[in-house]
């Protein structure tokens, strides 16, 4: 007989692990299906660190979700008894006329977030690892930091297991079909078939393969980050080097203090703007990748531009407006979608899991997610 569940979650990465945990916590009989390991390094939720920031240059509307995400990360950390979020403060910086810096400051002002406006000289005096051009300015917000993504996934999976969830790794979903307009779903994998009342799709760069409405909306993009050994290591420790986003004439970059691995980590948003097939792209970083990143470090963080220690690739899954998709399917409301996190989603995983559980069980959520509707495309 086909196994039957209350809900199935397709993809158990950053978002899917949180969704499984929130569903299981509500007493739901939930199955999580993951084609790779839990956790794994084929998607968007690996690399030892992901920025967490409350000041938000993308749009002030994200701040309420970030506050709730912060609460949920702290609850998960207390429960898991292992640090998941390291507070370093966050820096959003760029030229004085930068739209990103202006919006970051506005997000703090509109939502009464503690913050400071710093000149380039003031920033360097306080945090000597930063050596930005004289005409640059920064917004400092003390609650920012970085999450340990692999540990966050493990913590959510541990919570889900304690609440009775079933999670199957190395089991690839082949297809799903509705069993009625809103009566349930049947999910077929390369191992078996399962049925459930609701389906949550958190398949990252592969999401459009399972949701026709996302075809032509989501674009998987190759992303590369590097770790360089600082020439002045003391300047790049977590207590002296806040996480950062930096807007430059050549694009926006982001980075972290030294943590867990040798070297300070950074990357360029939309790296070399390579739209790829998530199953067939150059995963091994190249010398061209390294040159692009090293030239940036030499210009903006010269005390950090020592020998290369490590490079990794991952995937962004972008929407046209770079905002998320959090919604149910209009024709099949028993299917909830979390997709298109566009390179800035992991910090929201804890609250996205809560939202997707709401959508799967109730078809709606108390969180304001109107800007993430699928029909905007």
Image (spheres, rainbow, N blue to C red):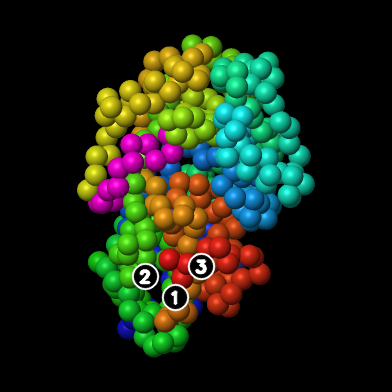
The tag earlier along the polypeptide, 2 or 3, is 2
Measure the C-alpha gap from mark 3 to mark 1: 10 Å
Residue 150: x percent and y percent? 47, 44
Crowdedness near tag 1: few (<14), some (14–19) or many (≥20) residues, C-alpha within 10 Å:
some
- Nearest to N terminus: mark 3 or mark 1: 1
Magenta segment includes 192: no
User: What residue occupies the far front of the structure in this picture?
Assistant: 97
Task: Please tell me which of labels 2 and 1 falls first in the chain.
Answer: 2
Q: In front: 202, or 332? A: 332
- Viewer-side residue, 319 vs 142: 319
Q: CA distance from mark 2 to mark 3?
A: 12 Å
The residue carrying mark 1 is 329
Cβ atoms at labels 2 and 1 below 8 Å apart:
yes
Q: Residues within 10 Å of mark 2 (few under 14, many from 20)?
A: some
200 left or right of 210 in image: right
Residue where numbered disc 2 is placed: 213
Label at residue 373: 3
């Amino acid at each position: 007989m086909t196994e039957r569940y209350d809900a199935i979650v397709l993809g158990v990465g950053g978002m899917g692990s949180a969704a499984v945990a929130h569903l299981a916590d509500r007493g739901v009989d939930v199955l999580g299906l993951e084609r790779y390991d839990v956790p794994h390094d084929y998607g968007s939720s690996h690399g030892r660190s992901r920025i967490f920031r409350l000041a938000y240059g993308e749009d002030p509307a994200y701040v309420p979700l970030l506050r709730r995400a912060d609460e949920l990360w702290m609850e998960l950390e207390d429960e898991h008894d292992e640090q998941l979020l390291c507070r370093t403060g966050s820096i959003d910086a760029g030229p004085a006329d930068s739209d990103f810096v202006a919006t970051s400051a506005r997000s703090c002002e509109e939502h009464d977030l503690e913050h400071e406006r710093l000149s380039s000289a003031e920033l360097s005096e306080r945090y000597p690892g930063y050596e930005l051009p004289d005409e640059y300015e920064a917004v400092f917000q003390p609650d920012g930091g970085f999450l340990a993504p692999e540990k966050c996934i493990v913590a959510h999976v541990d919570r889900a297991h304690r609440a009775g969830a079933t999670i199957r790794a190395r089991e690839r979903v082949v297809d799903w079909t509705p069993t009625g307009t809103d009566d349930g779903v049947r999910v077929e994998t390369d191992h078996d078939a399962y049925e459930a009342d609701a389906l949550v799709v958190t398949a990252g760069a592969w999401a459009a393969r399972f949701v026709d409405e996302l075809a032509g909306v989501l674009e998987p993009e190759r992303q590369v980050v590097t770790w360089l050994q600082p020439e002045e290591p003391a300047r790049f420790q977590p207590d002296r080097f806040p996480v950062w986003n930096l807007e430059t004439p050549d694009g926006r970059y982001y980075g972290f203090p030294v943590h867990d691995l040798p070297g300070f980590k950074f990357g360029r948003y939309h790296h070399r703007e390579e739209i790829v097939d998530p199953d067939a792209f150059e995963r091994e970083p190249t010398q061209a990748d390294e040159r692009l990143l090293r030239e940036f470090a030499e210009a903006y963080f010269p005390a950090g531009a020592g020998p290369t220690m490590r490079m990794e690739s991952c995937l962004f899954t972008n929407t046209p407006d770079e905002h998320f998709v959090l919604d149910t399917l209009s024709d099949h409301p028993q299917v909830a979608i979390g997709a298109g996190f566009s390179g800035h989603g992991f910090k929201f995983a804890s609250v996205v899991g809560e939202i997707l559980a709401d959508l799967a069980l109730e078809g709606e959520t108390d969180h304001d997610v109107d800007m993430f509707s699928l029909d905007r495309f």
